[in-house]
Every structure is written in structure tokens, then in C-alpha cells.
Image (cartoon, helix red, strand yellow):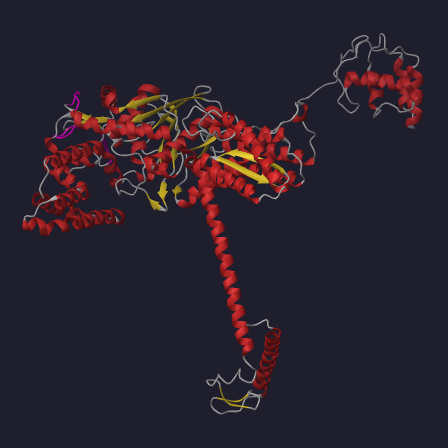
Amino acid sequence: MAGSSAEHAPDYRSILSISDEAARVRALNEHLSTRSYVQGFSLSQADVDAFRQLSGPPADAQLFHVARWFRHVAAILGSPRAPAPPCGLQASRGRRTQPPWSPPAGSEPCQLRLYNSLTRRKDVFVPQDGRRVTWYCCGPTVYDASHMGHARSYISFDILRRVLRDYFKFDVFYCMNITDIDDKIIKRARQNYLFEQYREKQPQAVQLLEDVHAALQPFSAKLRETSDPDKRQMLERLERAVRLAAEPLEEPARRGLAGEELDGRVQVLLEEAKDLLSDWLDSMHGSEVSDNSIFSKLPKFWEAEFHKDMEALNVLPPDVLTRVSEYVPEIVDFVRKIVDNGYGYVSNGSVYFDTVKFANSEGHCYGKLVPEAVGDQKALQEGEGDLSISAERLSEKRSPSDFALWKASKPGEPSWPCPWGKGRPGWHIECSAMAGTLLGASMDLHGGGFDLRFPHHDNELAQSEAYFENDCWVRYFLHTGHLTIAGCKMSKSLKNFITIKDALKKHSARQLRLAFLTHSWKDALDYSADSMEAALRLEKLLNEFFLNVKDLLRAPVEVAGQFEKWEDKETELNKSFCDKKAAVHEALCDNVDTRTVMEEMRALVGQCNHYMAARKAARRRPNRALLESIARYLTHMLKIFGAIEEESSLGFPVGGPGTSLNLEPTVMPYLQVLSEFREGVRRVAREHRVPEVLQLSDALRDDILPELGVRFEDHEGLPTVVKLVDRDTLLREREEKKRAEEEKRRKKEEAARKRQEQEAARLAKMKVPPSEMFLSESDKYSKFDENGLPTHDTEGKELSKGQAKKLKKLFEAQEKLHQEYLQLVQNGSVP
């Protein structure tokens, strides 16, 4: 040790050799009294050795030299049991120093993991460029109304996007496409155009029937060839509807009749046979449609409707939207480079991707997502489109697994110029070219529906990695689960789908989102009465909690009174709050598991409700600061999930989606005055016993205010709770209450009727004298004694002693009942 004094060493050695600790400390105290250990004190190794012998400063006040020396050394070295300081440690002259500090061990923070279809497991999410996340999502093919299958994908991805952006604080760049060039669009546009032309000609009944019968022939052949049971059932329904609509026209048309009634029947048949006639007209005249504007009108209309639906569902718009029709030059360049790289080939004006060449190339793999589906010709042909699977087209391929990058246009199809002749893009290349143009050679996230994995997304991966000559076009592939309708497969081709507009007529956007939040985004979701009822219950639970907290916060209180002493119940609730927040974080890190999050939030609200109920029972106010903190946290999380659309600091806003006005702060002061006035009127009415006024007060609460979206909740001994609630919800609650009261009244009347019947039956039984009770049972007994007791059965056989004893007991019981009856008659109690 620096500055150590040799003269102290012998003294220390002799002191440390003393076995008795008390004697050793006294000797040390005497030794230290001769040293100046405050000014000019230097720490020697002997000091350190002596210090290590003590567990703490002595309590005896007379040993103050040791106590002061111990504290001084401890300030330099730490505890006596800590490791010895390195040689050369020197205390500052005349100054104490802080003891050593070490940070807490802490716990390992959660890492966000996402289910990656490329690995079929949850992988730690690591963006390629710091906090910036590039994300491409497959958008809709716009040829018809958006349905709940679309809602399944786009609401789910909207929730994921919001969580990554607003909870995990990533800088998300979200790109989505609109497919406005596709076989389905081309065919539907042609059919619509040809059918409208046909309708404008106003075919007469005879002509229409002739055409319908002609159209039924290929349709019936198609029906016979259909093996899929669901599709067959759909076609049978269509055929049956057409035949039923045609039947009322047959006889009048044959007789040459006319009139308004006949015209009405013609319109009915036209509507029922629209799909049938459209297919038939397209098969004959589809190749004659050449105006490109016909093929753009349909997707423009349905794209606009799609955006309206997404806005109604509170789905955030993409940062950038791409349309295939606007990226044709980029698609042509993309295809050209794939051919130049050796992975594409030209055949009869079309360009195909060489899957065999690609799969056999070093560093490449075909079928990354669903390798077991490679070679599935049915799936591959569905991916090519209805207009691209003729025998001629299939013969152009080198391998059955090859797919079209560019399709030579046939008559009746839109076309664009390119190096290989006029044509149009293949389906799979569209996303690759648009995403590659905007996001480059590698993106962080790519999303789409589960049914797009093969062949669409596997083909996207192959052609993009062939273009960029890499093996990492997508780092994480996300696929949302299927949506079923009440347990049945949903399919637009089977006409078994619910449009988003129809769904929003039954339930709000928030209710639909809550239903999705209570399911995993990657698993199947059943859209049914049961799943929506569960969402409604959850919404009501959350909303009632928010309304109760708002009512609590509106109660006047002094500034200092906002902060109340916490007791065990508050500490317990706060601990649960902290635990739930931690559980929510863990769930979000675990593949954004919103189902678990909603369960934790539901449980937290349940604990708060239990706490508030206990406080109410004790006639004590709940802790407003704690409940406000919990309510604001829940509001914050629901905002992140997109379940609260407008600006609201606490709970669901009142004023309706899309309105800038929040009614609550505007009208609540007036409602509070009304509530207090009503309370005063009710109090006076009770004191003066004026039931008519109390009835009017109840009518205001039960009949008038619900029509305005206002709920008054009366609690004995407590102020009335005022809540602003959705008007439809209140009216529904009122109807349910009326039904419940009616059911209660009906059950009460039924119970009274049963009691009357039972009483009447008992009275009728009491009237019968015991001597006559068995005489009517001639089917059981043939002989009786003088008292009317049976002695023989119907066969004339004498009854056994056991039977006779049993009948005797019944006889005596009836005798007692009859005596009661006679007594009632005597008292005048029975008419």
C-alpha cells in the first residue's frame, strides 16, 4: 500500500493474534488512539488485514477510535467481506469517498418475433436498415365488391402495421398494389359490356326464352363436368333459379301475350339469368371487344369502392399505392432482364419463367414457401388465369411448372406494345416489378392472404430473385389466416361471401376490429353470430368501464384531494396493472398476439370493476388517479390497434366515426345539471309522497333520454351516474330490458297458473271420501271391503299383505285430506 508505515506492522500482528474478539477490539482501540487517522492517514496492508477481521463497527461508545477508523476504511474499501483493493489504493487526504456501486442484474428484454412463412416459425424481427421497415402488401384484384375475406387481410395487416409503427416505434414504409389488369377483370368487363348491350336491345319474351335455353345447354354441360361439391351446389342453385324464373314466361310467350305483367316477368328472368347469359354472350362475342377503355372502367369503379370500404373500416391508407396499368413499362423492363439473365424464354409471343433452370441454378431455390405444392397443376393453372389455360397456351411451356411473365394478347383482350409483340403482364410479375421498383432488391416484410402462398408468392420470389440475382428478396413473409362464414368456406367464385358494406350494416368498424383482435392474425377466423356476439360483449365491457371512470373523474374534488392515500386494495390493483402491462408487452413481442392482449385487458377491467364495486359497497370513492391511469393506458392500446378512430384521451369517443365533434365535453355539463335537478325533484317527491312525479322521473330516464343517447344510472345512496352511450346501443338495451321484464312477467303468470292448477287438483282430491277413492279403479281391482279398500285384483286373486298394507296407508292419507276439506267447508273457506 502506498504510504504504509512499517512501525505499525508489529503492533497489528500482536493484536490480530489475540483470540478473544472483545480483547482484540480493545487492544485495537488503544493502538488507534496513538495514530492520527483523520489527518494525514494512509491506508496500509496491516490496516486492511485488521479491518477484514471485523464484521462491523463496535457498539460500545468507549471504543470510538475503532468505530471511526472502521467507518473511514469502509468508505474506501466497501464492506469488510469485499475483495481486497488492488495495491496502490490511496485514500484522499481529509476526504471521504462514495462506496462502490454496481447496477442491478435486471432481466433480458423481450424481442419481437414474427411468424415467418419462409421458415414456418417465429423469428426475431431484425430490419435491414436500423429502425426503417420496408413492407409490400398484395392488394385486391378489383373486379367486384370487397368482401369480408379482404377485411380479414387488410384489417389484420393494419393492426400489425400500427403495432410496429406506434408501439415498437419502427419507421414503416408501407406499399400496396391494385391489380387492375387480370384475367378475371378482362372476362368480367367483357361480360358486363356484352350483357348491358343485350339488355339495351330489350329482348322480347320469346327471344329471351330462346336465348336462355341456348345458354342453358353449355351451362348444363359444365354442371355435369363439375366435381367440386361446393361449386356444383352453387351451379345447381343458379340453374334452378333460372328455370323457375323462365317458367311463368313459357305459356304467355307461346300465346303471344303482352302487357306490363309480362314485361315484369321478363325483367325478373333477365336478372336471374344474368350470369348464365353473360357467359354465353362472352363465348360467342368476347373476341369482338377491342376497346381498351372497356377494360379500365370496371377496375376504376371497384378500386374506388375498395378505398371507401377501407376508410369505413379505419384501415390506414398505404404510404404508396401502385396500379399495374401504370407500371407496364417497368414490368416490360423487368421481364426483359429476367430473360437476359437466362431464366425466361419467349414462346409464341408470350414469355415464360423457366422454373427448372432457376431451381437448378446455384444459390436459387424454387418453391420456398410451399415446396410440397411444386408441380400441383390445378394450383398452377388457377394462378395462370381462366383465359390462359387453353391447350395451345399450355403447349408453349417447356415445363408444366413454368408460368407466364408476359402473355401475348388474344382478340378481346387489352394489349400493350413490347419487344415480343402486343401483350399484357402475367399476374405474378406485376407485384415483383412494382415492389422491386419502389423497395429495391430486398424488402423486410411481404404480406398477403394464406391462399396466395403458392403459386403466387412462390413465383414472385423466384422471378424477383432471378431479376436481382440474389436469394433474399423478402426477409419475412407474413400470411393472414383464412376467413370462414359460420364455419363454411368463403369464396367469391362460389358466391358465398359477405360484402364489407353489408357487414358494416350489422356491426360497426370497431366491433369488426375487436372480433379480429380476439383472434390470431395468422390463424383461421370464423365470422359468425357467435364471434360477433363475443366482440359486442367485449366492447360493452370496455365502454362501461370507460364511462364509469369518466363519471368518477367528473365528480368535483379539491386539487389536493386528487391524491389519496393508497391502501392495500390500491397497491394490489396497481401491482396487477403493472403485471398486465408486462404481459401485454410479452404478448405483442410474441408474434403480435392480440388475442392474449385482449384477454389481459379484459382481466384488468374485471379487476377494476371488482375494486370499484367493493368501494361502492363500502360507500367510499375509488382512487381516481389509479383508475384514470389504467383507463388511459387501455385507451392508448386501443388507439394503437385502431379500435379508437378519433382523438380521445380516455375511452371511446361519443359523436360517431368520422365526426370532428366530440359531444362529451360539450353536452356533459348540461346533463350533469339535469341529473342534479332530477335528484332534487325525486327527493322532494319521496318526502311528500308524490308517486306521479317519481313516475315522470323514471320515464325521463327509461324512455326519453335513451332516444338521445344518454343513460342515467340510479344507485341507492349515491349520485346518479351520467353516461353518453351510442343511441342504438341504448335502444337495444331498452328492448332487451322490456323483453326480460316481459319474460319475467310471463314466468310469474305461468307460475301462478300452475299454483292455481295444483291447488285446484289438490282440492279436487280432498273432496273425494276415502271410501270412494279406489272404487273408480276397476281396471286394477275387482272386490272391495265395506270401507272401500280393495281386496282382490282384476283376476279375482286376493291382494298380498304388502299390497294391502300399502293401500291402507294411501287410504289413511286420503282420510286425513278429506277431513281437512270438511273442516274448510265448515269454516266457509271453500265455496
Q: Can residue 582 be spotted in the picture?
A: no
As for residue 409 lying within the magenta part, the answer is yes
Residue 201 placement: quadrant: top left
Task: Classify residue 207 as left or right of residue 778.
Answer: left
Q: Is 483 on the left or on the right of 408, as rendered?
A: right
Q: Residue 392 appears at what percent x and percent y?
A: 14, 35
Tell me the quadrant of the picture where the N terminus can be found: top right
Pick the front one: 695 or 332:
695
* Magenta residue check for 470: no
Query: Horizontal and vertical percent for residue 28?
Result: 91, 19
Q: Looking at the image, which residue is at 48% across and 85% down?
A: 780
Q: Is residue 134 visible?
A: yes
Given residues 183 and 64, the one toward you in this image is 183
Majority secondary structure in the magenta region: loop
Position of residue 247 relative to residue 277, above or below, is below
Residue 770 or residue 312, whichever sits in front: 770
Question: Is residue 296 shown left or right of residue 665?
Answer: left
The image shows residue 340 at horizontal and vertical percentages of 23, 21
Question: Relative to the observer, which residue lies in front, 182 or 233?
Answer: 233
Q: Which residues are magenta?
A: 401-420
The residue lying at 64 percent from left, 32 percent from top is 623
Q: Quadrant of residue 503?
A: top left
Q: Which quarter of the picture shows residue 284? A: top left
Image position of 51 with respect to 531: above or below = above
Q: Position of residue 554 (x, y in %)?
A: 58, 28
Q: Is residue 699 left or right of residue 33?
A: left
Considering only vertical position in the picture, is 397 above or below 68? below
> The C terminus lies in which quarter of the figure?
bottom right
